[in-house]
Image: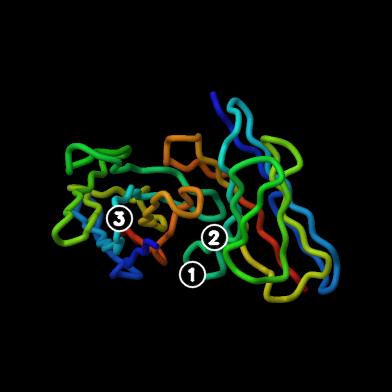
Amino acid sequence: SQTIHQWPATLVQPVGSPLSLECTVEGTSNPNLYWYRQAAGRGLQLLFYSVGIGQISSEVPQNLSASRPQDRQFILSSKKLLLSDSGFYLCAWIRQGAPEAFFGQGTRLTVV
Amino acid sequence: AQSVTQLDSQVPVFEEAPVELRCNYSSSVSVYLFWYVQYPNQGLQLLLKYLSGSTLVKGINGFEAEFNKSQTSFHLRKPSVHISDTAEYFCAVSGSNSGYALNFGKGTSLLVTP
């Protein structure tokens, strides 16, 4: 069976510090991978998606970047965090040819 | 591009009463439709999905939804809710653009009280 791991679960970082959130998928190959952000009281905003190694598409301009160094690994990064980067970050994957998405447990990021 | 509107931000309901959470979508192409549930500080869990075929789809926990193409709706229903159904519910749509990424509505908070 397939599983998705996302860590850390919670993170408190000062303004201006770097960020690295990691997501890995097990039990499948060549998945589509996604990063979403959920701000307090709002829906989910798509930040990045990837259809293959090294292929990253950004949906909104922002202070964040994403990378996919391996087939089942998706990393969300920032060089310098802003207060507005606070939120709940969710990683998701879709099997090629099947549109149903599976989500990780999320990372609660608080920038102070 | 596809988009979703969830018409109610909060829905209070008494235990064992029926509930309907409304969702309308817009798209110029064929779409896939989903309902997800989110419990506090957790990820999203798929309740049900419409990909093709029968317009009435049944999901987990006794939920069902009906795809209505003419009204561009995909409302979620449950005939009798439980306290444990209290959660945030998200309607989502996807298509072939953006790598089949889901576009979500802003969510409906379902609060079930005794």
Label 2 vs label 3, nearer the camera: 3
Q: Amino acid at mark 3?
A: Val
Residue A1: mark: none
Looking at the picture, do discs 3 and 1 lie on one chain? no
Label 3 vs label 1, nearer the camera: 3
Q: Position of residue B43 (x, y in %)?
A: 53, 49
Q: Position of residue A69 (x, y in %)?
A: 76, 42
Tell me which chain the residue with mark 2 is part of. Answer: A
Q: Secondary structure at mark 3?
A: loop
Quarter residue A57 falls in: bottom right
Q: Secondary structure at mark 1?
A: loop
Q: Residue at x 57, y 68 (%)?
A: A39
Q: Residue at x 46, y 48 (%)?
A: B100
Looking at the picture, do discs 2 and 3 lie on one chain? no
Q: Are marks 1 and 2 in contact (CB under 8 Å)?
A: no
Tell me which chain the residue with mark 1 is part of. Answer: A
Residue A42: mark: 1
Q: Residue at x 70, y 62 (%)?
A: A109
Q: Is residue B34 above or below residue A61?
A: above
Q: Amino acid at mark 2?
A: Leu
Q: Which residue is mark 2?
A: A46
Q: Amino acid at mark 1?
A: Arg
Report whether residue A7 is seen.
Answer: no
Q: Is residue A111 above or below residue A48?
A: below
Colour scheme: rainbow
Tell me which chain the residue with mark 3 is part of. Answer: B
Q: Which residue is mark 3?
A: B29
* Depth order, front residue of B37/A20: A20
Disc 3: CA contacts within 10 A as few (<14), some (14-19) or many (>=20)? few
Q: Is residue B22 left or right of residue B107?
A: left
Q: Quadrant of the C terminus of chain B?
A: bottom left
